[in-house]
Amino acid sequence: MKLIYLSTARIPDTWAHVFQTMKMCEAFAKAGVDVELVVPRRARTSTEDPFAFAGVVKNFTITRLPCIDLFPGTRNTFLYGLRTYSFFFFSWLYLLFASYDVVYTRELLAWTPSRKTVFELHNITPSIAALITRLQRARGIIVITEGIRQALIERGVPADRIGTAPDGIDPDDFSHPESRAASRTRLGLAPEAAIAMYIGLLDVWKGTETLYATGRILAPDIRLVIIGEGAEPLAQLRQAHPEVLFLGFRPYRELADNQSAADVLVLPNSGKSDISAKYTSPLKLFSYMASGKPIVASDLPSLREVLSEKNAFLVKPDDPEALAAGIRFVLANPEEAAKRAAKAKEDVKAYTWQSRAERILNTLRP
């Protein structure tokens, strides 16, 4: 089978979806598929080897097509659209003459032959209604949560056309993390401090406002450490939330080592938005599970598809007091914390990129 994975991502890049794309291409190829990743030829792309950057085997090819990429890094809507749709035009031309069996993509607006296209959905947006007919005609649909699957069924997509495949991890990326002491020394953290850590994008739907408020409640006994960035400058965040230690962005390749510095890992997703409550399958969830550290997470349907009271500590979402209480409980009950952390580490073995790729391919093969 020849599979073209079509993506608008800059390759290489530090975004989580870029790593997910590269890991899935590697996993598809390991499963015996001839894989070609087709991406735009972006300006100011790093010259670093994309396979080494993402930590994947070079078992698939990368094809870069033209796009109109003016003022790289800008958030201007027009320029973003120009870059995206110019790439869709050139990818449409490319697909007209390419030989392949399947186009696999997260780009719902891409100009691809519906009968040969498998769409992977990570959210349900208001514009999805205009795309239902296209989804109904697609070769297949892969979603990351049952919440997305049910939303599509309610909108008229046949249930047997939709497969659910949560995100995952590569176990090798987390097999030999550095020690807690070494990680803390490298990050400049106090050796004996009680540390609750969040790693990821700083966005409202991810529960950051709850997280910041929790930091105030926990101080000074427990230090909340955040690794990641968002739209708001770090200098402003540090001034607004002095109780929280903001370490900024750290590369994905450090993830396993950075998690070692924590006593507890926090996943404070908000219940106020559907993407968080029903649709997300965050990569950090699976990396947290692989860490062997206890997890305190919001009690939401999306997270309960993977987490339970056996492998995590679930608390009321959007409630700083509840989140702080959960963190304190973990630190006060190390035996129970270790038991649930061990269970999470065992459970995450079912969520590898390889098993995900094979599950998807089983729905595509005759």
Image (cartoon, rainbow, N blue to C red):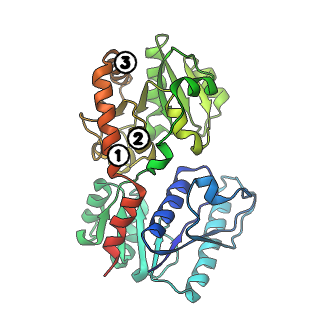
Q: Nearer the viewer, mark 2 or mark 3?
A: 2
Relative placement, left or right, of 250 versus 304 is: right
Do the residues bearing badges 2 and 3 touch, measured as CB atoms within 8 Å?
no
Residue 6 can be seen in this image: yes
Q: Nearer the viewer, residue 105 or 206?
A: 105
Res 8 quadrant in image: bottom right
Q: Residue furthest top?
A: 220
Q: What distance separates the C-alpha of mark 2 from that of mark 3?
A: 19 Å
Q: Is residue 84 above or below residue 322?
A: below
Q: Give whichever of 25, 45 is nearer the camera.
A: 25
From this viewpoint, which residue is outermost toward the front? 176
Return the x and y of residue 352 as percentages of the image width and height. Answer: 39, 54
Amino acid, disc 3: Leu
Q: Which residue is mark 3?
A: 331
The kind of residue on which mark 2 rests is Ala
Q: Quadrant of residue 185?
A: top right
Taking 120 as reference, is 218 above or below it?
above
For label 2, the residue is 290
Question: Which mark is first along the chain, 3 or 2?
Answer: 2
Pick whichever of labels 1 and 3 is earlier in the sequence: 3
